[in-house]
Amino acid sequence: MALLRSRRRPGGSSENTWPGFVDALSTLLLVIIFLLSVFMLAQFFLGQALSGRDQALEKLRQQIADLESSLALERQQHDDLKAEFYEISATLQSANQSREELQARISELEADLEQAQQARKSNDEQLRMLEDIQNRYRESTAALAKEKELSQEARRQVDLLNRQLAALRQQLAALQDALDASEARDREQRATIKNLSARLNAALASKVQELSQYRSEFFGRLKQVLAQRSDIRIEGDRFIFPSSVLFASGSATLGPEGRQEMAKLAQTLKEIAATIPPEINWVLRVDGHTDKLPIRTERFPSNWDLSTARALSVVKFLINQGIPPERLAATGFGQYHPINPADTPEAYEQNRRIEMRLTQK
């Protein structure tokens, strides 16, 4: 079969034309695959940057996945058709070569037959030779007929493959149009999302700045109210109340002095809250902290329970003073966030505290 292919190549033009067509089609497929790869990368980074818009882009990603599946299927069909075409082309070339050889052989046999007929009367050996030549001629004629049938079948299969390739090209063009449309929609959505993100960031920055102004006013007013208390500290955006000012040892019930200080704080907070616009979602977070000395009582099995109970006690008092409960949050941290990590009575005293912080939801 290899010998027949090598003999056919110098004279045949179809074999030289077909690989060029296949190369062009393969290049087109590579370009499409590259575009799909670039598109998928863009989808990935877009999904990372705009995770809040996943639901809006889910349908687009599903369409891209369907297109990729269709393209992979069409590419597989194309590879199968190309392999089948090569096989049929090789068979056709082999059949044509065999037919040419048979035709040449028939010509030789016809010449031999003519010579044998002229010398048939000479002797019996020439008669037997003539019969042998006639038999070989019939066999060669039958073989040639079979080769012709094979050639016709091969041509029909080549025509079928050409029609299938034309249909494949149409499908690839449709896929390309769908990809172009998807990319256009993606560009429009990215522009819209970018605009919305910029507007949202600007709005958030404005709200944060407004809350910072009210927080500064709140801390300034509260500092004036508590100016005479040297044991109440202000660190950054936090007010720190020693537990000894608010609670008795091992207790989560506000004492008289603690209720007095919390009443001052509540009055200041109500005055500031009346000036804060309702669209700003502010909240006063009350954090309870203890020292590292363990407590194990029936009411407070751990330091965590004690710190949470103290924070909740302050929150309930502020609610009774007229602070809206949706503007308050109680949190217990136990002994796990000390101010002073030393193992001294002074450090223990510093770590037993209530911290308050005005923040945004």
Image (cartoon, helix red, strand yellow):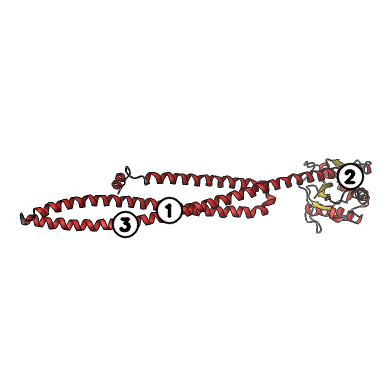
Q: Is residue 218 visible?
A: yes
Using the numbered discs, state the Cα–Cα distance from disc 1 to disc 2 in whole angstroms.
82 Å
* Circle nearer the N terminus (1, 2): 1
74 left or right of 317? left
Q: Secondary structure at mark 3?
A: helix
Q: Which residue is mark 2?
A: 218
Q: Secondary structure at mark 2?
A: helix
Who is closer to the viewer here, 242 or 172? 172
Q: Secondary structure at mark 1?
A: helix
Amino acid bearing label 1? Asn
Q: Which residue is mark 1?
A: 162
Circle nearer the viewer, 1 or 2: 1
Who is closer to the viewer here, 51 or 328? 51
Q: Position of residue 161 (x, y in %)?
A: 42, 54
Q: Classify mark 2: residues with Cα within 10 Å, few (<14), some (14-19) or many (20+).
A: some
| Residue at the image position 55 percent from the left and 49 percent from the top | 176
Q: Position of residue 25 (x, y in %)?
A: 47, 47
User: Residue 184 shows which numbered tag?
Assistant: none
Q: Which residue is mark 3?
A: 150
Amino acid bearing label 3? Leu
137 left or right of 99? left
Using the numbered discs, state the Cα–Cα distance from disc 3 to disc 2 in whole angstroms.
97 Å
Circle nearer the viewer, 3 or 2: 3
Q: Classify mark 1: residues with Cα within 10 Å, few (<14), some (14-19) or many (20+).
A: some
Q: Position of residue 243 (x, y in %)?
A: 86, 48
| Residue at the image position 94 percent from the left and 44 percent from the top | 225
* Circle nearer the N terminus (3, 1): 3
